[in-house]
């Protein structure tokens, strides 16, 4: 009896000690989320007070389901995420492998590689826009000089070419981050495995496929979580580079939501869009964490 | 102020960027903030603020409406009442290189022909005409001028959406032909805002430019402009092929309205009346070159030399000025139009299809916002 009541006392003490932290979390994370969900069930157009603010149930969600611009934006987001992350993983892996070798000036190279990552996204995006903007821009000049283009082109007026600076700038900016995460994973691999494989006559390609990549999986998964969630929320880069154009053919969901919420001030509909994005990224995070958890558990046994 | 010694005026700074200022106002007014008592509105905001009940009607003060350019009054009128007084006017102008094209073109077709001739000359500029073709409000201001030139409208006087009718399709096709057929407009204009267009024209790279009056001052400065003293302005001409077309300049500019939540509406009106008085407008023209909205000032000798271009040209432009659709849902309507026009101009869609889609989406917007009834009431007036 005495023990139980003591446990109860400790539990109560524990709760009271974390209560301030929990209430802060409730205030800054849970309350806004609940409010957004509540808002998303209403018709609330800040510009049109004559409509009132009636409760409309799931009507906003029904509108999203029928909204071609939302589905197109979702498609653009997936496209951007898949293409840029694939490139970043491949290039990042090469960089990590190179940086993992012992050579003079390795510390310097590791630091230098991070420079693009350190530049604020908006600044980086403006730089890339400057490079690709106008027929007299740097990209056009280089490509025409190299004989790749016959004449300068306007990159931002065709969907296919408008993606080029967007993806290029994301790859340029984020690959160093990916490389660094992978490098940390590489350094955890026991070198004796490679020595044993070399003794058994395995070549470098075999070693990469059967030692490096399997053992790097946890690092790759962590990278994927970070980058997928970032990719799904991409906003500033595209906002600055293409503004979602030409038309709306490079518009990601975050930009569309910003537009509904802060340009058109449709609080109800914009909140519903926010909830949908939240649900998608949350679902993705869960998926990844589960995948990662299983693998880590497997390593332990 | 000696005229009204009881009234003390405080200035409040707001963002320069129009959409940021708009956002700030909407936040204030949703919170029923009565300060500032006077709001400076962009010309396309008045009906929105009026329908929302955020600004007060001015009719009871008996403003002298007939002394202002009709278009500036029309733009500030909603459901039969006047909600703001025009402070200064902005109008879309066609800039022309007088050394390359001495005679003012009388039709849109002449603009294209003159541009081609000038471009073909030895050492002629690479571009025939530059305008604002990026996907933003500027694209609408240009489109409204081509639309007027072909006799088209976005919404007619009965409140019907007519933006997919033949004159509008012709106007959009004409803009597209400038890019892809006669090649007088470079594809770059599809990413141009006002400043990119000005740089191109000011560096001597274009024969014509569509822009606002602000460009006159910078381009007359010989230290930065290669075209100082070599350009003239006129309103955008009508098309020769469209019988119902007329020379059209898009109306812009600033309006002054009374915040519906202010405690001092009468004092606010006195200040608006003072700021929009002829003397004050003259002073504004002298100090910053902004165009007065009062007709009589264009015959006033004191106006001469204030705005950098012949008064007669400015007056002609403002007389041909047309407001963009006067509706509380203008911002959303404009967004639809921006996207669809841009799609057509970058050749993602054919003009007729893009405008059909525009019309369908504007109609859906009108239904969703309950605007059909309000617009019918507006039409009956």
Image: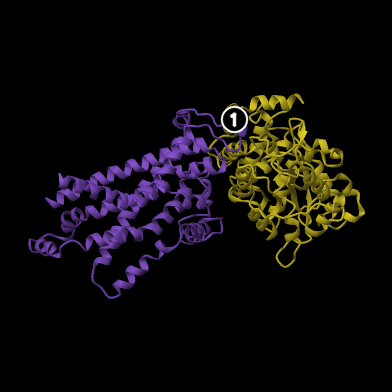
Chain colours: A purple, B yellow
Give the side of residue B27 with respect to residue A198, left or right.
right
Where residue A36 appears, x then y in whole percent?
A: 45, 39
- Residue at image location 54% in from the left, 37% down from the top: A266
Give the side of residue A289 with respect to residue B300, left or right.
left
Where residue A95 appears, x then y in whole percent?
A: 30, 62
Residue found at the very far left of the displayed protein:
A200
Q: Answer yes or no: is residue B159 visible.
A: no
The quadrant of the picture occupied by the N terminus of chain B is bottom right
Which of the two residues, B107 or B192, is positioned nearer the viewer here? B192
Vertical side of A285 occupied by B168: above or below? above
Vertical side of A55 occupied by A9: above or below? below
Which of the two residues, A218 or B230, is positioned nearer the viewer here? A218
Kindly state the secondary structure of the residue where label 1 is placed: helix
Which of the two residues, B162 or B294, is positioned nearer the viewer here? B294
Give the side of residue A189 with respect to residue A41, left or right.
left
Give the side of residue A106 with respect to residue A30, left or right.
left
Place residue A204 in its image quadrant: bottom left
- Residue at image location 34% in from the left, 59% down from the top: A177
Q: Answer yes or no: is residue A103 visible.
A: yes
The quadrant of the picture occupied by the C terminus of chain B is top right
- Residue at image location 87% in from the left, 41% down from the top: B67
Mark 1 burial class by Cα count in 10 Å: few <14, some 14-19, many 20+: some
Where residue B5 appears, x then y in whole percent?
A: 84, 54
- Residue on which the image places disc 1: A51
């Amino acid at each position: 009896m005495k023990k139980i009541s003591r446990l109860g006392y400790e539990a109560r003490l524990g709760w009271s000690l974390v209560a301030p932290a929990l209430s802060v979390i409730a205030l800054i994370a849970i309350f806004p989320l609940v409010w957004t969900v509540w808002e998303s069930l209403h018709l609330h157009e800040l510009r049109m007070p004559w409509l009132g603010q009636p409760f409309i149930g799931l009507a906003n969600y029904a509108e999203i389901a029928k909204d071609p611009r939302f589905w197109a934006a979702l498609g653009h987001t997936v496209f951007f995420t898949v293409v840029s992350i694939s490139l970043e993983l491949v290039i990042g892996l090469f960089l990590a492998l190179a940086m993992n070798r012992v050579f003079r000036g390795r510390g310097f190279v590791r630091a230098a590689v991070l420079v693009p990552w350190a530049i604020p996204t908006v600044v980086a995006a403006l730089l890339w826009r400057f490079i690709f903007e106008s027929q007299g821009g740097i990209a056009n000049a280089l490509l025409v000089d190299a004989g790749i283009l016959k004449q300068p082109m306007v990159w931002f007026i065709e969907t296919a070419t408008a993606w080029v600076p967007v993806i290029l700038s994301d790859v340029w900016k984020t690959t160093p981050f990916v490389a660094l995460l992978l490098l940390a994973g590489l350094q955890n691999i026991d070198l004796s495995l490679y020595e044993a494989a070399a003794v058994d006559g395995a070549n470098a390609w075999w070693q990469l496929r059967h030692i490096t990549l399997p053992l790097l999986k946890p690092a790759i998964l962590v990278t994927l979580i970070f980058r997928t969630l970032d990719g799904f929320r991409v906003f500033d880069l595209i906002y600055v580079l293409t503004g979602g154009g030409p038309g709306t053919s490079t518009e990601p969901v975050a930009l569309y939501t910003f537009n509904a919420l802060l340009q058109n001030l449709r609080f109800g509909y914009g909140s519903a869009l926010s909830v949908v994005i939240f649900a998608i990224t949350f679902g993705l995070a869960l998926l990844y964490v589960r995948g990662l958890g299983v693998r880590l558990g497997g390593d332990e046994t | 102020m000696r005229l009204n010694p009881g009234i003390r005026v405080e200035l409040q700074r707001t963002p320069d960027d129009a959409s940021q200022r708009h956002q700030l106002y909407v936040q204030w007014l949703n919170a029923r903030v009565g300060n500032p008592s006077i709001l400076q509105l962009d010309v396309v905001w008045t009906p929105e603020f009026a329908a929302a009940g955020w600004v007060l009607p001015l009719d009871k003060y008996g403003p002298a409406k007939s002394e202002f350019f009709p278009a500036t009054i029309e733009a500030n009128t909603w459901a039969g009442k006047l909600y703001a007084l025009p402070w200064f006017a902005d109008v879309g102008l066609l800039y022309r290189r007088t050394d390359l094209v001495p005679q003012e073109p009388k039709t849109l077709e002449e603009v294209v022909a003159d541009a081609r001739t000038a471009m073909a000359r030895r050492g002629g500029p690479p571009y025939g005409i530059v305008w604002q073709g990026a996907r933003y409000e500027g694209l609408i201001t240009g489109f409204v001028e081509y639309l007027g030139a072909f006799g088209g409208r976005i919404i007619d006087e009965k409140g019907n959406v007519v933006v997919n009718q033949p004159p509008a399709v012709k106007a959009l096709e004409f803009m597209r032909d400038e890019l892809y057929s006669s090649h007088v407009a470079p594809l770059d204009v599809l990413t141009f805002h006002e400043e990119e267009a000005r740089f191109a024209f000011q560096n001597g790279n274009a024969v014509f430019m569509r822009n606002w009056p602000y460009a006159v001052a910078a381009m007359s400065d010989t230290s930065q402009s290669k075209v100082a003293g070599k350009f003239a302005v006129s309103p955008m001409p009508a098309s020769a092929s469209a019988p119902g077309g007329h020379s059209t300049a898009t109306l812009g500019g600033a309006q002054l309205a009374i915040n519906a939540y202010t405690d001092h509406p009468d004092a606010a009106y006195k200040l608006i009346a003072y700021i929009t008085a002829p003397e004050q407008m003259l002073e504004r023209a002298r100090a910053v070159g902004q165009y007065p909205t009062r007709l009589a000032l264009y015959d006033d000798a004191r106006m001469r030399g204030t705005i950098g271009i012949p008064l007669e040209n400015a007056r002609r432009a403002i007389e041909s000025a047309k407001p963009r659709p006067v509706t509380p849902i203008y911002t959303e309507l404009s967004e639809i139009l921006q996207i669809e026009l841009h799609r057509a101009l970058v050749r993602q869609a054919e003009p007729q299809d893009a405008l059909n889609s525009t019309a369908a989406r504007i109609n859906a917007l009108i239904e969703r916002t309950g605007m059909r009834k309000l617009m019918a009431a507006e039409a009956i007036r």
